[in-house]
Image: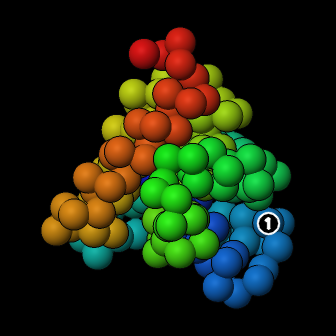
Amino acid sequence: MKSMSRLYAVQALFQMEHSSVSVDKVCEEFLKFRFGDYDQDLRFIEGNQELFKNLVSNAVKFQAAIDQMTDRALVEKWPIDRIDPTLRALFRVAGAEMKGLDTPSKVIISEYLTISEAFYPDGKETKFVNAILDFMARDTNPHDF
C-alpha cells in the first residue's frame, strides 16, 4: 500500500506541474479516482491515503529546500529545472519523505528506484536516480549510513 501511495504522489506532483492545480484539488482527485481503481489485470490497487497526502503536501511545502538539496546532487550546469518533469516529481516526493517522515533512507532509495523503473524501464535513468537519491539521503540523514 505504501508503494502505491508513493507512485501516486509522484504522478500527482507531475500533474500539478502540468496543469497548475492546487494541492487540495489534486489530492481530492487522486483519492477519488485512483485509490481503489483497478489496473490492466483488473487487480484492486490500494494505497495508504494518509501517506499520499503527507508526501504531496510536504513536497509542495518544502519544495524550495528539496530543490536546493537536489541541485547540490546535480552537476552544476544541470539544475533541477532542466531535468525531466517526471524525475523532478520523483525527487521532490522522495525528498519530502526524507525530510518529513521516519522512513529509513535505504527504504526510500529502494522504493523510488522501483518507481523510476516503472517510468524508465531501459534502466539509464534509474542509475541517475540512484546516484541523486543516495546523495540526497546522505545530505539529509547522514546517521542512516
Instruction: Report the residue at 32% width, 55% height from top.
Output: 128
Instruction: Report the residue at 83% width, 66% height from top.
Output: 24
Instruction: Report the residue at 61% width, 39% height from top.
Output: 97
Residue 51 sits above or below residue 115 on the image: above
Name the side, left or right, on which 109 lies relative to 68. left
* Residue at image mark 1: 23
**Given the current orientation, which residue lies at the most extreme top position?**
143
**Given the current orientation, which residue lies at the most extreme front position?**
76
Residue 48 sits above or below residue 76 on the image: above
**Given the current orientation, which residue lies at the most extreme left position?**
122
Frontmost residue, 15 versus 122:
122
Task: Residue 39: give x, y in percent of width and height.
Answer: 35, 70
Name the side, left or right, on which 67 lies relative to 82. right
- Three-letter code, disc 1: Val
Frontmost residue, 121 versus 54:
121
The answer to whether residue 37 is visible is no
Task: Residue 53: give x, y in percent of width and height.
Answer: 71, 51
- Mark 1, Cα crowd under 10 Å, few <14 / some 14-19 / many 20+, is some
Instruction: Report the residue at 57% width, 47% height from top.
Output: 72
Please tell me whether mark 1 sits on a helix, a strand or a loop: helix
Task: Residue 50: give x, y in percent of width and height.
Answer: 69, 43
Task: Residue 63: give x, y in percent of width and height.
Answer: 74, 55
How are the residues colored? rainbow
Quarter of the image for residue 28 reads bottom right
Name the side, left or right, on which 22 lies relative to 79. right
> How many numbered marks, from 0 up?
1
The answer to whether residue 108 is visible is yes
Which quadrant of the rendered structure holds the C terminus? Answer: top left
